[in-house]
Each structure stands twice: as C-alpha cells, then as structure tokens.
Amino acid sequence: MKTIKTLLSASIISLSLASVSAAAHTMHSADNAQLAQAVASEHRSAANKLRDQYRHPQQTLEFFGFKSNMTVVEITPGGGWYTEILAPALKGKGKLIAAHYPDTGEDNYYSNSRKRLEKKLAGHDMYSEVELSNFVPKKASELAPAGTADMVLTFRNLHNWGEEGVQQVFIDAFKALKANGVLGVVEHRLPKGAMASDENRGYVSVEKTIAQAKAAGFTLIASSEVNANVKDKANYEKGVWTLPPSFALKDKNKEKYSSIGESDRMTLKFAKVAK
C-alpha cells in the first residue's frame, strides 16, 4: 500500500514535470511568435510573400528547430529573401551571420553580389545586428568562428557549387557548428534514379547530398516534404530555371510553367552529433 509520503513525492514530481513542459511550450510559442511576426512583417514585399506558398519559410525553419536565441549562419543570402525573415526573427535574442562572397574590388558577380547585400543590410534598421563573414566557393571558409553556430542554413545553393564545392561547404559548416548544431539544406530535388541531363539541370541528388554530408561528419536527423511539389517533373528545356520565379523561356508556355509552380525541393536536417 502506498504511503502518504510516496504519494506526495509522486505528486511533486508530476507537478515539476508539468511545469518544465509548460515552460518549454511557452518558450517554443514565443519563438514561433517572433518567427511568425517576421514572416508576416510589412517590410517584406508582396512579391516575396507570394513565394511563401512554395518556400514555406515558417514551417521550414520550425522543422530545422529554429529558435530566436540561436546563432544562425545563412550561406550566400543572395537577394536576401530568407534574410528578410531571419534578421527580425533573431534580432534582440540571437545572431544572424550572413556568409557571403567577399568584395575583392573586382567588377564580377561575386563582388557585386556582396555590394548589393551590404547595401540592403544598411538600408533598414532590422538588419542592424546582422554580421557578415566571407564565403569563397570551393575553398575553406570560416562561416563563423569554430564551434559557435547553432544552425547553418543553405537554400537552393548546392547546384551552384559542384561536387567539390558542396563537400567543402559541408566541412566548413561542421567546423562552424556547436556540438549537436544543425545543418539545414533545401535544394531542387533530382528524381530518384534520374541521370543528369540538360533537361534537369539545377536539380540535385538527395542520395549524393546525404552521402556528402555524412562524409563531412554529419548525421541525417530527418527529412521533410514541406517543400515538395509533385507537379514538377524536372524535365524542361532550360532545366529548373524554366519554372518560376526565373521563367528562363520568358513568355513561352509561361501559363503552363506557372501552373506547375516552383521546383520540387528536398528539405534535409543534419546534425553535428556530439560523441
């Protein structure tokens, strides 16, 4: 027969666990609220918000385990589509590091892209806490000081870097992350078993991506279909750029490609598992 002392102890433990669970839920809700506010913010253009139906920023970041107090590295932000969400979602609690091509002073894509990003960051107070680091494709880069990042993110970049470049990026990301830190990858998905061709240019093998991440030391934690698009068959005249938002064929069959929507994408969550 249980004693009063045993029953009291059980009740105390139960209440303690409930309190911890409630506190965790409250913290998670606060993170979600700050992220949701960033996604819905008026500073985002109507054109960018229109792409949420394909890019699912809130669901994608929540799948990766995003929290507003993290140190997050975004590799090659480009025009800053995700930066517009990450910067305010982290401001005041965490840190966003934009790892972008350095400005070498030359008149080329890389230097001009860095200048455009710096101009964008200087143009609004919500970017005031964003830090910049240098990322050089196919060369070892310090995305963030070793062991300081909670999360490293790359959105639709792997196809630009080639096999050697992707392998180096994953090595750099592993170095930048803390133990148990997360590498989040979103990329155009090559249909399983498909061979590379002109018609599927820009699409990347899921199996190869997983193998490259594992070779760099990562463990695959989970995959998500949040950015899947079953209408995308990955066989177009201009590869993935045939689809929106690029419309590489311009007005040719534009209605057809608009009805397909943006590419089918893999969404993979890796971790630097502590040993």
Image (spheres, rainbow, N blue to C red):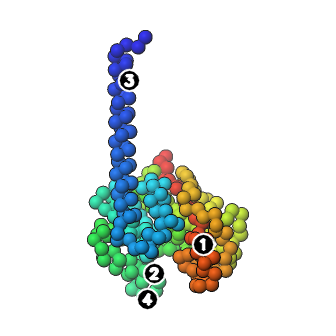
Q: Is residue 170 left or right of residue 240?
A: left
Amino acid type for the residue under numbered disc 1? Ser
Viewer-proximal residue among 93 and 264:
264
Q: Is residue 268 left or right of residue 34?
A: right
93 in relation to 98, above or below: above
Instruction: Pick whichever of labels 4 and 1 is earlier in the sequence.
Output: 4
Query: In percent of the image, x 48 and y 54: which residue is there?
Result: 63
Q: Which residue is mark 1?
A: 259
Q: Which residue is mark 4?
A: 107
Q: Which residue is mark 2?
A: 110
Residue 209 x %, y %: 59, 62
Q: Which residue is mark 3?
A: 10
51 in relation to 116, above or below: above
Numbered marks: total: 4
Real-space Cα separation, disc 3 to disc 2, in angstroms: 62 Å
Amino acid type for the residue under numbered disc 4? Asp
SS type, badge 4: loop
Instruction: Pick whichever of labels 2 and 1 is earlier in the sequence.
Output: 2
Residue 187 x %, y %: 56, 66
Q: Is residue 250 left or right of residue 134?
A: right
Q: Quadrant of residue 265?
A: bottom right
SS type, badge 2: helix
Labelled pair 4, 1 in contact (Cβ < 8 Å): no
Labelled pair 2, 4 in contact (Cβ < 8 Å): no
Amino acid type for the residue under numbered disc 2? Tyr
Query: In percent of the image, x 34 and y 51: which residue is there?
Result: 30
